[in-house]
Every structure is written in structure tokens, then in C-alpha cells.
Image: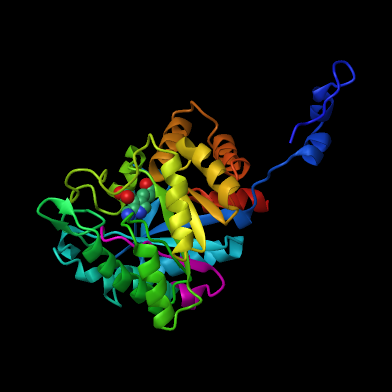
Amino acid sequence: MKPTIASFPAARPRRMRQSAALRALARQNTLTVDDLIWPIFVMDGKDDETPVASMPGVVRRTVDRIAKAALEAQNLGIPAICIFPYTGLEARTEDCAMAWDPDNLTNQAIRAIKDAAPEIAVMTDIALDPYNINGHDGFVENGKIVNDRTVEALVKMGLAQAAAGADILGPSDMMDGRIGAIRSALESEGHQDVTILSYAAKYASSFYGPFRDAVGASAALTGDKKTYQMDPGNADEALRLVERDLQEGADMVMVKPGMPYLDICRRVKDSFGVPTYAYQVSGEYAMLQAAAQNGWLDGEKVMMESLLGFKRAGCDGILTYFATTVARLLNT
Ligand SMILES: NCc1[nH]cc(CCC(=O)O)c1CC(=O)O
């Protein structure tokens, strides 16, 4: 599409910028509460919460408090909430069995949210890292992350989450073939309506640092995730992975991290036209909050601008730790 534009002075683009009313009329993209998915951290215990030091404003909550938070999010109009468990070293084993335990923290939280706030969609994370002794998303054998055995475990993990009532499964592990395996297991176990939001283009990023503190993985993790998460230099590979995950039965796809990868968001949306999401990850949140706390940036304004950027890049929604703050702002 080539815009037809008169030459100066017939065309004065500033005419359309002269007032809030004209700017509103011409604005192409907007951020709404419908665009938000709220990631939350769940921990063991009762009626308690602890702050995440590297993510100012973010806390880990016990299951009962998660239920309350979900109701609050539902009342704000936020369409989905995404659960991540905090696990200490005691929950971590070689066989990661807790990952598919029907009573693990995630599954308890799913049931509690479904009870307290039945309208909000509940999303989960599928990867072995919260329960793995070495902090990796897959099983490690002889120093290597093994694919196919991991996929079998991920299927069990996903089925347990579906049985607990999850609406959206989020495989974040980057193993090959997991979307197809999870999809066919869901079909054969009677969970045909459970949706999959694939972390399709997930990069081996240093922006996940604060998250790994939040979920207790930093202390456990040995080495890096470069043999399964994508190389930050690659763009075309993201399109191949998105296409593959769609062919295997993903309903929605995600690009992660967000702000440094907006080019990928745009290309995914233009190439496939499917529901496309970005994850504004912990490190992105932390850097905006840190600058705001120092008075170097206007926190509220950069929060809104950063999220609008995802809409402009073609995203249908954003996973963001700012979700409730944004929703409150948009609702006033
Ligand atoms: N599979 C784990 C997982 N799921 C979401 C995030 C990162 C989220 C964030 O940084 O906000 C990670 C971390 C990782 O891959 O090491």
C-alpha cells in the first residue's frame, strides 16, 4: 500500500496532530484491557505474600491470595491470568515428578481461581524448570537436554493442568514436537476445547533474569538454555517455528521476549494472521521500573507506550506484569 500524499503546502501532516480530538480520530492502534494477560507467581503457604526483589511491585502469593488476585483481575476486565510456581530446592528432583502432580502448586492455583473467578481464562506454563534439580526446561542426560523423553513428561504436565481446569496451556520449553504431542493427548483424553498458546519463538535471552529469581530457578540453573531456546540473531527461524507449531495444533502463538523482538511480532502477524502475543518479560519490566524509581523515566507513560508498541507491531495481546496497573489506568 502506497499512501497518496499531496506535496507541501497542500499536505501539512501536522494538521492532523493539532488537537487531542483529531489525534484520537486518526489513531491507528490502541491499548485496551482486552489485550492483557497477567503473569502471577504462586508459592506455598497460607494468606501470605513476599516481594520479588528484582521486580518492584511484583509479589509471590499463596494459593488463597492468588484466588483473590484473580477475582480482582476479573473485576478489572483482564481476560487471562498466567500462573508460575515458585519452587524451592526441596521440590526439585531428577525425574521432575511434581510437574504432573495433580496437587502441585499450579494445579491448586488453577482450581482456586476457577472457584473464585470463573470468568477469567487461566493460562499455565509447561516446562520442567520449576521441578528440575538443575533448573532446565527438559531432562538432562550426560550434560545434554534430551528432547523426546522431555516431551513425554510435558504431555503429562499439560494433561494434569487441563484436568485441573486450565483454559490455555502455554508450552514454554522449546522442545521439538511438543505441540503435536500435547494436542493429540488432549484430544484423546477428552480435553478437545483446551487451547494451546505456544511459546513458538522464544529466544535464549538474558532478559529472563528477574523471573528466574521470582520462581527460585536462579540458584538451581546450571549453564544456559541456548541448545533449546532460539539464537537472538535469528528471524526466519521464528517463522518456521510458528508455522510448525500452528500445523501441530497451536491456537495462538507467542514471541518472547517482547520489546527487543518487535520485528518478529510484525513478521509473524503478517505471515500467518493468527492470534499473536508477546511476552514483555521480567527484565523488560525491571528496567522500566528501575528507571522510573530513579526518576529517570515517567513510569506510567513508558509503561503505556511500551505496551502500545506491541499493538502497533501486530500483537493481539501482551503478557505483562503491569497488567493490573494498566487496567486500573484504562478503567478510570
Ligand atoms: N520455561 C520457563 C519460563 N517461562 C517464562 C519465562 C520467563 C518469563 C520472564 O522473564 O518474565 C521462563 C524463563 C526461562 O525460560 O528461563
Q: Is residue 300 above or below residue 221?
A: above
- Asked which colour scheme the image uses, the reply is rainbow
Residue 152, quarter of picture? bottom left
Task: Read off the magenta span.
Answer: 113-129
Counting from the top left corner in percent of width and height, residue 111 is at 41, 76
Q: Residue at x 25, y 46 (%)?
A: 227
Q: Tell whether 191 sits left or right of 102.
A: right
Regarding residue 63, the answer to whether it shows in the image is: no
The N terminus appears in which quarter of the rendering? top right
In the image, 268 versus 70, the foreground residue is 268
Q: Is residue 289 above or below residue 241?
A: above
Counting from the top left corner in percent of width and height, residue 83 is at 40, 62
Q: Residue at x 48, y 60 (%)?
A: 246
Q: Is residue 174 above or below residue 112?
A: above
In the image, 230 versus 223, the foreground residue is 230
Regarding residue 326, the answer to whether it shows in the image is: yes
Q: Tell whether 285 sits left or right of 147.
A: right
Q: Is residue 30 above or below residue 177?
A: above
Q: Residue furthest left?
A: 142
Counting from the top left corner in percent of width and height, residue 182 is at 37, 70
